[in-house]
Image: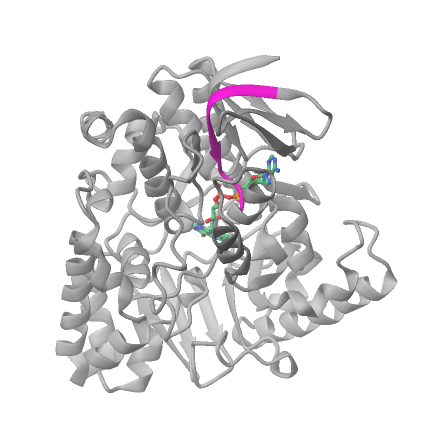
Amino acid sequence: MSKYDVVIIGSGLGGLLCGTILSKEGKSVCILEKHHQLGGNLQTFKRDGKIFDTGFHYVGGLNEGQNLHQYFKYFGLTGKLRLERLDLNSFDKIGFKGKEYSFAQGFDRFVEILTNDFPSEKNALIAYKKKIKEVCNHFPLYNLKPVHDLSSEQKYLEQSIGSFLNSVTSNKTLQNVLAGNNLLYAGTPDKSSLAMHALIANSFIDGGTYRFVDGSSQLADQLVNIIEQNGGVLRKNSEAVNFTIENDKIKSVQLKNGEQIEGGRFISAINPHATLQMVNSDLIRKSYRERINELEETISSFILFVSFKPDSFKYLKSNYYHFNEDTVWTISSYNPEKWPQNYMFLTPPSGNSNEFAETATAITYMKYEEVQQWENTKSGNRGADYEEFKKQKAEKLIEQVELNHPGFKKSIHKYYTSSPLTYRDYTGTRNGSLYGIVHDCNNLLKTTIPAKTKIPNLLFTGQNINLHGALGVTVGSVMTCSEILGMEYLIQKMNHA
Ligand SMILES: Cc1cc2nc3c(=O)[nH]c(=O)nc-3n(C[C@H](O)[C@H](O)[C@H](O)COP(=O)(O)OP(=O)(O)OC[C@H]3O[C@@H](n4cnc5c(N)ncnc54)[C@H](O)[C@@H]3O)c2cc1C
């Protein structure tokens, strides 16, 4: 039986970052991953000789002096990632009611460009910018400062994004445009918080917004190298199924093949509900289990992955968010009859292409119920009716993309699709959820999961404890590792990296 200081379950970004931090700080770590590929949503796949991302398309805050840059510096990632900066004047374009609006990198430019579209709304845009900055200043870990109490964050976590946008402007079009990339957080105007919107919006608008050239798995590969150089162990095909508890503490985790991995501490970087199913202890009260079990998951997705004919479709340096509705809040107005009501479209960068794109990805929402009838089937073997369902959906989505990007259809060489079942099976999220649990600003306590659990040597990390995405999961891993290393110590090390 092997024994480690810390055993981490799940090798998504959350698990890998905890492994990086703890191994850098001298702890022996072992990361267990149930799949044959490490990285969770950082995984890429190859079809037609081309690379496709599964769950990472762009990241903000990566310029010198910005938060993610400093965190990445501490991890040892500086200079090791192949990145391409998105268009400075329009990293995102919002296609709403027949017009296209650009989000620029840099707050002043952001305000200036949108003021051209909304000349009478300049003050509202300035108020928006001020509030986003104010919110971000109140989240210490987003500014690499230790957290002493959570009171400064609370009011921003409790205000809904819908009510905030209403307070900034009565212009409904501007409200919609400002929330136009809410697919980034599966937003609903009455449940998603101002804080969630602000932290995500700021990380992109503040500049330093990049895509990964040839896929995001390079981030996982680099983190794996760092962990291994520090003596850490990563094990693929190692599904954790059960914890062995002794004297109210976890002694070991059992793998599907029966093997036991012993540890001093355990970090679960997977869904908290799945974690609790592995814990048989009275320390976890029934009411807590029920609460975790009942947490709502964010909606899932249907994704179209396109391989282009050579030199046929121009590479686009912006991400596009298109809407077929009079609202950008399409989860609230979700209607399978009108599908797809919105989608995100992008051409990921490849080392082989410049002027023309090799691939494109279109992402739209899909509820799990739409594929539930195939939930007991396995990938690659779900049956002809499932394949037909996906083909029909893909064709609908292709028609939509063609409307907004003429010439798209004839440039397609081949296409591939994923459904909520694909994500359920490849990343282990419940019902293929895009970003883990829904954090509801009206019910903050109930929908917030702290890193600490009632089991003294079990911690949570990953997108469910703080916020999803590169920055959210990074901050979450700092919260988790602080419980082991001490927050003041860790933040000081990170600031002096
Ligand atoms: C379609 C999509 C697009 C996205 N785009 C972006 C983007 O552009 N920018 C951005 O910043 N974020 C983006 N995100 C969000 C981001 O990918 C996630 O928030 C983040 O990767 C979550 O990391 P995680 O470690 O919490 O979980 P995951 O990446 O889900 O990793 C969990 C890992 O645990 C493993 N596992 C599960 N159960 C077990 C078990 N019992 N034993 C062992 N291993 C287990 C899984 O196989 C998986 O590898 C996107 C997400 C999706 C789905």
- Residue 165 or 113: which is nearer the viewer? 165
Q: Quadrant of the C terminus?
A: top left
Point out residue 149 in the picture as x, y percentages from the top left corner: 18, 46
How many numbered discs, if any?
A: 0
- Residue 223 or 475: which is nearer the viewer? 475
Residue drawn 51% across the image and 58% down it: 314
Query: From what the image shows, is residue 466 above or below residue 255?
Result: below
Residue drawn 19% across the image and 30% down it: 488
Question: What colour scheme was applied to this rendering of the protein?
Answer: one colour
96 in magenta: no
Residue drawn 29% across the image and 52% down it: 203
Q: Quadrant of the N terminus?
A: top right
**Magenta span covers which residues?**
261-271
- Residue furthest right as drawn: 384
- Left or right, 471 with respect to 486, comes to right
Residue drawn 49% across the image and 83% down it: 325
Q: Is residue 299 visible to us here?
A: yes
- Residue 306 or 410: which is nearer the viewer? 306
Query: From what the image shows, is residue 44 above or below residue 242?
Result: below
Point out residue 134 in the picture as x, y percentages from the top left corner: 15, 59
Query: From what the image shows, is residue 221 above or below residue 358?
Result: above
Q: Is residue 78 visible to us here?
A: no
- Left or right, 410 with respect to 152, comes to right
Q: Specify the quadrant of the image occupied by residue 97.
A: bottom left
267 in magenta: yes
Query: From what the image shows, is residue 484 above or below residue 173?
Result: above
Point out residue 94 in the picture as x, y percentages from the top left corner: 39, 71
Prevalent SS, magenta region: strand
- Left or right, 485 with respect to 314, comes to left
- Residue 162 or 108: which is nearer the viewer? 162
Point out residue 70 in the picture as x, y percentages from the top left corner: 25, 35
